[in-house]
Image: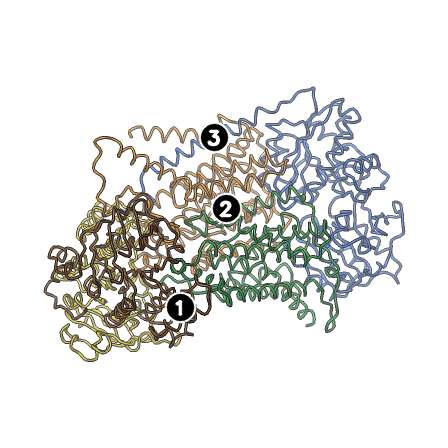
Amino acid sequence: MKSKPIWLLALLAAAVALPLVFPNPTITTIAVLTVIFAAAATAWNIFAGYTGYIALGHAAFFGTGAYSLAIICQHWHVPADFTPFALLPLCGVIAAVVSLPLGLVALRTRGHTFIVITIAMFFVAQLLAYDLRGVTHGSAGLSLPIPLWSGDFYNMPFYYAGLLILLLALAVSWWIRNSKYGLGLLAIRDDEDRALGLGVKTGPSKLLAFVISAFFVGMLGALWAYYIESIFPPFAFDALFDVAIALMTFMGGIGTLVGPILGALLLEPAQQLFAVYFGQSGWYLVLYGALLLVVILLLPEGIVPTIRKRWAQWTAARARSSPNSPAPAPPLPPSPTSQHPAIAARGEGGER
Amino acid sequence: MDLILQAAIIGILTGGVYALMASGLTLTFGVMEIINIGQGALVILGAYLIYVLEQKLHLDLFVGLLITMPLMFGFGLLIEWAFVRPLKRDRIMLSILVTFGVALVIEGLLGLIFTTDLVRLQAWYTTASFQVAGFYLSYIYVFGFLLSVVLLAALYFLIYRTKFGASLRALMENRTAAQLIGIPVERVSAITFGIGVALTAAGGMAFGATNSFNPGSSYDLISRLLVIIVLGGMGSLGGALIASVLMLVIEDVTAVIWSPIWSTTVFFIVLVIVLLVRPQGLFGQVAGRKQ
Amino acid sequence: MSMLEIRNISKAYGGIQALSACTINVEQGKITGLIGPNGSGKTTLFNVITGYERPDAGAVNFNGTPITNAAPDRVFAHGIGRTFQLTRIFPRLTVLENMHVAAPRNGSMGIFRRWSSAHERSRAIELLEFVGIAHLQGMPAENLSYGQKKLLEFACILIADPQVILLDEPAGGVNPTMTNQLADRIRLLNQRGVTFLVVEHNMEFVMGLCDTVNVMHHGAKIAEGTPIEVRNDPAVLEAYLGD
Amino acid sequence: MSRPKGSQLWGALCALGTCTVILATLAACGTSGGSTTSSGPIKIGFTVSLTGDFSDDGKAVEQGYQLWADTINAHGGLLGRQVSLDILDDASNPDQVTTDYQKLITVDKVDLLFGPFSTLLTKPASVVAHRYGYALPEGSGGGPSVFTAGLNNVFDVSLPVASNLVSFAQYILALPAAQRPQTAAYATEDDPFTQPQVDLAKQMLEQGGVKTAYYNVYPAETTDFAPIAQAVIHSGAQVTIFGTLLPDITAFIQAFKQQHYNPQGLIATAGPDQGTQFLNNIGGAQSAEGIFVPNGWYAELNAPGNADMVAAYVAKYGGTPDDISSDVAEAYSVGQVVQQAVTQNKSLDNAKLIQTLHSGTFTSVQGDVKFDSTGQNTAATAYLFQWQSGKLIPVFPASAATAQPEYPKPNWP
Amino acid sequence: MLLNLTNVVAGYGGSDVLQGVNLAVEDGSITCIVGPNGAGKSTVLRVVSGLLRPRTGEITYNGRSIAGMNPRQILSLGIVQVAQNHSVFPKMTVRENVRLGAFMLSDRALVNRRLEEVEEMFPVVKERANDKAGSLSGGQQRLVEFARCLMLDPQLILLDEPSMGLDPKTLRQVFERVKAMQQGGRTILLVEQNARAGLGISNHGVVMESGRVRLEGSHEDVLSNPEISQLYLGGTISAAPKTSIS
């Protein structure tokens, strides 16, 4: 495993080099949108994956970030250059601040109620974008400054800004997963009341994760707004954004570090390319829907956990077949390599 | 005052139609613990089926239900068998994703067959109205409401007065125990899903007769249906009815006394307040995990 | 002075009075038993003490400090640990991770700390060895057998060095041999100064372990005394033991 | 969930890398397709909304572009070359529009671009086109916000959105005092296409002394129109002005019929112009009698190429001239204007095209076209139409009118 | 023998919980399975009732093979399982609960007759007929479960830890009913952690360990076997006074 850092650097280099190797703006356009979604799914996973709370209202923070940047640019007459990138963290902070009261209210509930409250909050946010005309210009939308970069160069800054946010989100996700705080979040996912009884400050913990994910999603919303150059309420606050990041996270493997990214890397380009290649024939939705169904039915646990499981089975099988393998684990307790957690523990549902 | 009263009456009548669409959703959730995001697309499918019968066979809309409801029931069985039954874990979230996929496929296919032109179901009663107490009530709203009442009553009878209903309720409360006394769990689940989808066919007819629709019309519907069943309490039929009516009355009254722009916002605020006081919804069961 | 004083606790659900003016004292360094028929309010009392339920009336004091209505995490931080009747562990975390959840969080919310410092890790493994499941440390907890989960739940609490441990039916659903092991561990900890309050139906277990036994019926205490005294109390025989 | 390991980060990057490669390969496959040549057909790219929110209008736009291409190809093509259309689905989504126009420009290497449907999608498309120096002529994305971004490459060949209802306001104010309505009710969808029109009409009518009995904006996703209709009825307004698209106006008309509410005048920004689809939705021609709709085009309009287009439409898609949605004409006009500019330049060069479009005067099936500095058509006329005996007939201004306006509107059947 | 298990192997996912179980249940007996947690006791019941399909091995009931049948088929042969803790339908009335026990029967008259019989044996069913089952105490709920399982007039009743969570007094009442059911001519196979109590009412004891049957015999044999007693029955519970249970 000595080669690990080399691989790590090589892959990072590959991601960095992508737009240089494939400079075609169509590819980089898809790449920009994909990193945005990968980062959003990673951020969402920090909250939803670790705490087990399925939030379907993060589009509210995406939109808040987008509108923040647009309004700031308008009021401060921000030039159309790299300055808006420097403003992204500020937009993230605004989204985080907005998420604080929403989180306080929503996190008093659990389960389905939580899901629906977040959906409702998202709708209220969208409605406000329409209704607060003084600030948002309602349905007429807002424009952002348009940089006069050439077409070939245009996507680069957005791609690297997105990649940077993605790496940052990934690093935060990794760090949280390995921190005591993150362990508390996982405990909340498994049994919240018990976690509370073991001294985990569940309320603040959940809220912090919620705010962290909102911060990243807000930054991404602002980046997206600058990229698209014009924002309208139905696009900045898009219900399908919520479904998309949840779908990506689940497809990749919820609660895992890389799952959300993997899901985004598969889904976002697939969606864009399907629309490009099959849109005209009308089969785009049918194919996209069918792809979803197939993946979910074949890999219900998500890609990463399934691969991990297969890998473990494969190594276990290899160990068993090799001649001088250690004796099988004693029958009781069940051997650590056994692969039946879900079915055995959930009992009834699984067997017949 | 008249205006508010009228808005409230319209709210109650349209609420009945929404209850029809939402009852299938809440029933499926109660029995199978899955959220059928595809319900909106199924409503539109139901509306298109009726549309075909009306256009090709000149069948009356309500008579058409006699054909589409069994058809949609069968379609429900198929969806359950193909996509829902294989889900073993994380059923709630995965069912959302799977039924979302089903909805996309349905929308795509409807687009291929019917194009994206807006259509509307036509019959003499979709435009006619009668006068009562000084204002006009349209027949279709009244008929839609009556249909909803009849079907919900039939559903109530099925669930609380029949052996099938008893097995269904048993399944809702304790799956293993139901299996141990010989209730065919999978069959009951499939039939329940089928009933939910069949109700959708009726809801689709009522929706199509009061709104223009095309294959993409499902998006606005499903969020409203979800909100209804949560407000009513997930799994509660009576809750779905009350919540639908409540939602439509609040929205309609707000629209006339203040502004249509704020009507949905006002309703969502009411929803959030209700849920903060009663997280399980108006008629839901407490789902606490505390010991 | 009692370490844990439960004074006149009342609690009603709808029309049902689960606890009515229940008073129980837990002496420091003792093992106190709590028995009573099903539905007599034992688990509700535990929930009130540990902050999962709010009492309608009454007070709970711990070392002289009122902890009535304190949230469960505060109660735990005070040094009161508890197990559940139907064992509750974190099924998707490994056994070792389960142990670390309860490890003390000093000050900050731990976001800047790795969950397994070397010291904490060795402490956790030591405790797992103490209850005899150290060999399972890397396994997802949901794969454990019922009894092993009980032991894990028990070990989980110990990592925070609580002063009092509340056990809710520790022997329920566990085979007698394991029950005895558990009794040994409880005694050992008690000798090291840990106080226990134990709810249990297994009379052998209670009689063999407890210094004093409280008997509850219909939400109130009907008897208190040594195991022998309680066993021969006619009220207890009538309400609980039968005959 | 396994224990956290440093290797997860490694795995993350591994996945990232692998998928980057997959993604790149996928997209690279697409790049092999296009090339710019000076012979062979001229490629013109655009997107339409075949799925999603705008899908009901997408088809008409596509038909308009297609008809224009057919016509020009039948007449020997543009600059002597055939025209081929490169059509992508934008799924009514700005992300997809951005990707699509990038692909049209950089992968398919189209020679010219046309605009998509709706203001909301035209804006992101115009930004992408601008980046590459392409002109973006369009006919169905004329909301004011498109023209405030300071781009010089977007041209709307149709009537500026806000002016649509001007002709109606003028007509009402020109009525003899005895006939002129005292009160008006306005309801408009919250949409950049409809609301500016209604607001301008309201301003004009108020200045002319028509009192506003009711004014409200409703959210775009409204499905339940009955209470708004009730409120309009309750206001007792003599004329009703709606900022709607097809589904909403259908619902309002249904409600009015049911409530036996007969305003003297009823106009809707869009919907009644949808020909047969409109009639089918409201239940027949009788119900449509007397309903006004503003438009920049009508089937009988005496404008260059209009008769040809109408004939071509009927030949290709069937139906009657009245079935033709004005979206078709708007799209067709885009082709015509571009055709004139390109022919004048004798070149497909987009920079020249932009220059020419800004300076010249053109004609289209919708009438004259002359762009101001922001790209809006200053020469367009707003016509007022009315459904009479199952036909949509121009009734105002008098110069274009083929019949007298019916006012007040007859009662519902 | 009414029920015979021969070399039954079964488990969940990748691991085998039962690793070759051989077991015989005599007609009209009460057979009690004891053993450590995780030995596979409950799994034996699940295999017999059809909730879990055995991987290999043979299960015969009245001489007929039932391995691989689904729960409904097995139920119709007269084998009923009462699940571990709380398996009443709490929001349904006691009568509805009991009636549902006869879900498989379509003869109304027969169902009514059975209901009367069951009400006679379990008075609580009649007394609380219209109360929600969830409002009953733990012991009463257990009795309702028994009553429910008798509606099919089963020959073999599988009980999974009937004593769990019950106080001593209730426990005794419940075990009395178990005994009474046997005296009514039924065969009972039960799994018990409370080994002494369980074996106390049984004719036959089975000790399981690690997915295999370690020992079987009359309950006296099992109780008096010193090694077994030491290993699984807690031996002499250190200095604890023996109570009068059982």
The chain letter of the orange chain reads A
- The percent coordinates of residue C224 (x first, y second) are 19, 76
Q: Which residue is mark 2?
A: B82
Towards the viewer: A33 or E53: E53
Q: Quadrant of the N terminus of chain D?
A: top left
- The percent coordinates of residue A302 (x first, y second) are 42, 42
Compared across the picture, whether A57 is left or right of E200 comes to: right
Q: Colour of chain B?
A: green
Q: Which residue is mark 3?
A: D22
The chain letter of the brown chain reads E
The subunit carrying tag 1 is E
Is there CB contact under 8 Å for labels 3 and 2? no
Tell me the SS state at disc 1: helix
Q: Give residue E198's mark.
A: none
Task: Please identify the quarter of the rendering in which residue E143 is found.
Answer: bottom left
Q: Colour of chain C?
A: yellow
Marks 3, 1: nearer the viewer? 1
Q: Which residue is mark 1?
A: E98
